[in-house]
Image: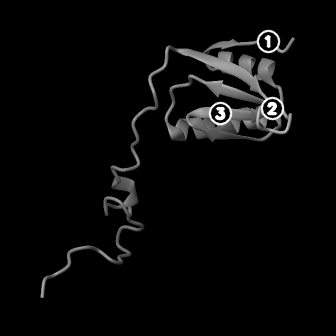
Amino acid sequence: MAKNKRLVYSTDKGKYCPNCSQPIQQCSCKTKPKSEKTDGIVRLQRQTKGRAGKPVVVISGLGLDLGELKNLSKKLKSKCGVGGSIEENNLLIQGDKRELIKKELESMGFTVKGNSPF
């Protein structure tokens, strides 16, 4: 009978990654590569299509990995007092808050380009 070397359960190092079978602290799967290459300019765009006429601001060109996108999304949503989500390496912030988002991103050091609300 062949001996199976796969670890089924252990409490000595906590949780294990289901992909690489390493302890979560030593997991190599969680280090994801950066998202697509960008030109260094963050773009803001107001969209209503497919959203029953309700506006959202699409923030693209950030060039951040998923963890950094989540942190930035949380910060922007709390700053604007609205909801939002992440879709295909773009942040979506509910409502037309382009001016507030532009000021906040520029204070973080991003170069922002966007159509003005007026």
Name the residue that disc number 2 marks: 80
- Is 88 located above or below residue 107 in the figure? below
**Quadrant position of residue 3:** bottom left
Would residue 104 be seen by someone viewing this image from the given angle? no
Amino acid beneath label 2 = Cys
Would residue 113 be seen by someone viewing this image from the given angle? yes
Amino acid beneath label 1 = Ser
Q: What residue is drawn where x is 65% and y is 33%?
A: 91
Callout 3 environment at 10 Å: few (<14), some (14 to 19), or many (20+)? many
- Is 4 located above or below residue 60 in the figure? below
Closer to the camera, 55 or 69? 55
Does label 1 or label 2 sit earlier along the sequence? Answer: 2
Name the front one of labels 1 and 2: 1
Q: What residue is drawn where x is 64% and y is 18%?
A: 43
Callout 1 environment at 10 Å: few (<14), some (14 to 19), or many (20+)? few
Q: Quadrant of the C terminus?
A: top right
Name the residue that disc number 1 marks: 116
Q: What residue is drawn where x is 56% and y is 22%?
A: 61
Give how far across and how far down residue 83 sits, in percent.
78, 41
Name the residue that disc number 3 marks: 91
Does label 3 or label 1 sit earlier along the sequence? Answer: 3
Classify mark 3: helix, strand or loop. strand
Name the front one of labels 2 and 3: 3
Give how far across and how far down residue 26 sits, in percent.
34, 54
Q: CA distance from mark 1 to mark 2?
A: 17 Å
